[in-house]
Structure formats: C-alpha cells, structure tokens
Amino acid sequence: MKRFVCIHGHFYQPPRENPWTGAIERQPSAGEDHDWNCRIARECYQPNGRARVVNDKNETIATVNNYAWINFNFGPTLLTWYERHFPDDYRRLIEADLESARRLEGHGNAIAQAFNHIILPLANGRDQVTQVRWGIADFRYRFGRHPEAMWIPETACNDRVLRILAEHELKYAILAPSQALRVRPLVAGGAAHLGGWLDLKDGQLDTRHSYRWFDRRPGKTAHIDLFFYHGELSQGLAFERLMAHSPACADRIAAAFDPKSRSAQLVSLATDGETYGHHEPFADMGLAHLVKFELAARDIAVVNYGYYLSKHRPSWEAELQQGPQGMGTAWSCVHGLGRWMDDCGCGSEGQSQKWRRPLRAALDWLRDRLAEVFEREGGTLLWDVWAARDDYIQVLLDSSEHSITLFLAQHLRPDYSDDIRKKILALMEMQRLAMFMYTSCGWFFSEISGLEAVQNLRYAARAIELAKSCSGEDFEAEFVRRLAEAPSNVEEYGDGAGVYRKLVRGGSAEAAEAQAA
C-alpha cells in the first residue's frame, strides 16, 4: 500500500488557574459546566477516547479510541489539569500512544508541545529553550519516551525555532503550506541538494511528501524534517463540517492523491483537536468511522508522521518564508506574526487591536526586570540560575517533598536555610509566571479585557508580587503606566491600566481570601 493519510489533532486550552489559589474559578460563559476546560473535556476530549461508530439504525457497532489513530499533541498545562480531574480518560491517552506504537513499529501517535503555548519567535532565546525543554520533559514524564516531534504553538516559526528543535533531537515539525518559501530536490541520502530552487506560489507546494530543512549557517549540520499539511482539506475539516459525512470526507482524501504517481504519497491533515466534538458536535463519531472503516475501504493506510518518516525519507529540501522583518510566519495570521504583536486586523471585525503591541512591550519590560531579580537574588545561591530554571520542570511535574529536595540538592549551594529554600522556590515560581504571561491566547482575540488577556495579566501581577517579596523591588506602578498605552475597545476600562486595576487586582490573594470567608 502506497497511499497514506496522517490526521494531526492539536488539543490545547490555555492555563486558566488563578495564580494565587491554583484553582480555576467558575466561568459563566461556559454554560452548564464549571469552566471551559470542563465543557471542552465533556464535548471533545472524553468522547474521542471512546468514540461510537453507529449504523443506519443508530446502533453502536464499534467503539474507537480516536487517539490511537491520529497523530496528536496535548498542551502540557492542559494534561496536568486533565490528569487531575479525569484520570481514567487521561489514561486512555497514554494507552492510545502505546497502542499506536505497537501497530506502527514503535512510533507512537503522541508528540510534544512547547510548554505553555507562547509564540516562540517573539520570545527571547532563554525562554525559547526553556519552553522546548519543559515540553520535552513533560512528554517524557507522561509517555515514557523522547518525543519524535514538537507542536510549535500556532505553527509560529522561523529558522531560529527550527534550529532549537533540531538541537534537541526532534525529528520533524508540522507547518502550514503557506510557510514554505522555496524547495529543491536532494541527492540520495538527503545530505546535499540537486538542482536549483523552485520558488513557490499559492497552491504550488506538493504536500504529499516530507521535506528537509537544513541549518545552512557556516559549519552547521543540523536539520529537521517538515510536513506541510494539505491546506484545503484541513480547512474543510476545521470550518466546513467535512466530518459530518465520513464517506464523503474519505472520498475527498482519496482524490488528493496523484493517480499517476508510483511513489508513496501522504495526505497530511492538521486542525485543532477541538474540531472533533467541541467546534463540530459529533465529529468525534465521524472521525472514528473515517479512520476505522472508510479509509481502509479505499486502500488508504492511517499512519502517524513518525512511522511514515521511518519508511520514506525526504527527497526535497525546503526553506521557510521569513515573514515581516524576518520574524517568522504562522498558520492563523496572514500578516506573519502580527496577530500576537500588532493591530493587524486578524480578529473580530470592527474592533481595534492597537493594544497588542503596547501589551507585549509592557510584558517584555517586566520580563527583563524579573530576569534581573532572578539573576541577582538567585545568583549567589544557585550554581547556575538558568540551568536551575530549566530543571524546575521536575518540581512542576512532581511537587512532592522528595522531588523538591532533589531539585534543591542539585542546584543550590550547600548549607542553605529554610528561608533560602522558600526564596529559591519563590524565584522559580516567579520565572514560571514570567513565561505564562506570554501564553499566546492573550493576543489572539481583539480585546485586552477578554478572559485570555486578563489571565496573562494576572500571571504578571503575581510575578510582580513574588519579585517584591524576594528583592524588595516593586515594578507594579511602572508596569501599569506602560499598560496605559494599550487602548481598550471597552469604554469602561479605557486602556490596559484600567483593565489591570478593575479585572486583575480583584484576583489577588487578599480578594480570594475575602471571597472564601
């Protein structure tokens, strides 16, 4: 069989926990459910673990763990929540990866994700590396193996990001077809190019095979393989209800192959995982019928990228679009990375996004101040503050006293007191929040007073408090002054400073305690 399909589901929700209490508060917009995590778990994450296949009498004829049939990633922060609240369903995810590895010669369906879904090209170098290392560590902790790949948040990518992935022994990445600039064939073995570049225009990229990206800097040899998903079919899955009729969906997939080709071909599809049940009700059932019956009936093998790559190495090289100012490109913004830094127009019609750039600038300023506190206060106590931050993921994954003691023994200079121990853990938490305040959803929508942007500001507020407790320095007044440059579309708030005062400060520890009293 030379016709293959790989369906990737990107399952993700932003962290929603109150940074002072660690609990997710009631979200009325989630309807009958306590919060949006609970609602989407009920509509999507749980059903896909036991999706029903029914006949024309609506009788169940099979139950399918969809995760065993699709390439997938789950956001690490979401998995932490999912494991705690739905342990049986969480175990089905792990079992699905093991089942797929048995079916596909050791290649499991699960891949990693950069830890809390920040836009990697817009982050500084230290945060880029930590996000990748934390994502890998989280994956190894849960799935018991090194990931073959990592989902890049929003597929927001440039050469620097690919270099970091390659340096961390990740084999491939998944990108949008619009992110490829040009391609050229490789000689046998894939180490050198053969012939000139083919500059790409809309629809010209052949997504039915993989490509190889090389670090072409002098003296460098790193590379990573790339899969560009089929744009039209992926769009259809995400927004055109293709999964409502799985036989027709299978026909569309079959039509995407070149009938004249004798080479192996892969139809690559990628969407948000929430498509299957949350965005499109009952799409989990359509997906189950598709992967279990309809594709096999058309002689199309359902595989994951790791398996396909083990059998069919790239024979073409690809270079990436650089995007405006060389910052990179993404799958959900036609303006490069504008959606996470500019008034680019992506978002709700009729609303200004002029707040995006001042918000990022204010957070960048705060990040740098927090880094100074971290280096100064931690530098005399830790052997290497940034290496310690990279390893702090072990405490996040296992917060037992034993785990904390091991972490401190490895990184803290000897003969430390209990006060020093508390200070180091506060500094580490400050740095965790300094990355969480960049979670991508904070910029995705059109208003700074939205749930996602406010959540990022809450992380910033808590980080400011921890910095003050560790160093005596208070950055809040200057931070709020900078937020005032971010205009809100809502008259009640006026600007980011108003949002911070009215929506963020109400989430402080004191307010939480008052509500609980």
Image (cartoon, rainbow, N blue to C red):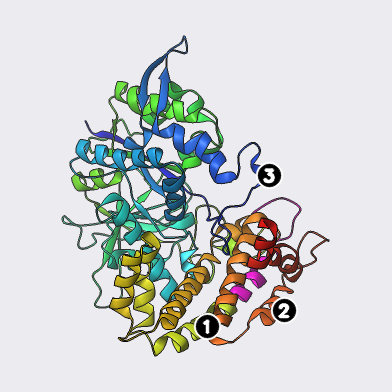
292 left or right of 238 in image: left
| Residue with the mark numbered 3 | 28
Image depth: mark 2 or mark 1 in front: 1
Q: Position of residue 376 (x, y in %)?
A: 46, 89
Q: Which mark is residue 175?
A: none
Label 3 amino acid?
Pro
Residue drawn at (38%, 81%) of the image: 385
Q: What's the CA distance linking mark 3 and mark 2?
A: 31 Å
Label 2 amino acid?
Arg
Looking at the rendering, the stretch of residues picked out in magenta corresponds to: 346-363
Q: What's the CA distance linking mark 3 and mark 1?
A: 36 Å
Q: Nearer the viewer, residue 293 or 463?
A: 463
Q: Which mark is residue 470?
A: 1
Q: Tag 2 or tag 3, which sits nearer the N-term? A: 3
Above-or-below relation of 261 to 340:
above
Pointer 3 with pointer 1, Cβ within 8 A: no
Graded by Cα atoms within 10 Å as few (under 14), some (14 to 19) or many (20 or more), the crowding at tag 2 reads: few
Q: What's the CA distance linking mark 2 and mark 1?
A: 23 Å
Q: Nearer the viewer, residue 47 or 494?
A: 47
Look at the numbered disc 1 and give the secondary structure of its residue. Answer: helix
Q: Position of residue 32 (x, y in %)?
A: 64, 36
Label 1 amino acid?
Cys
Q: Position of residue 261 (x, y in %)?
A: 27, 35
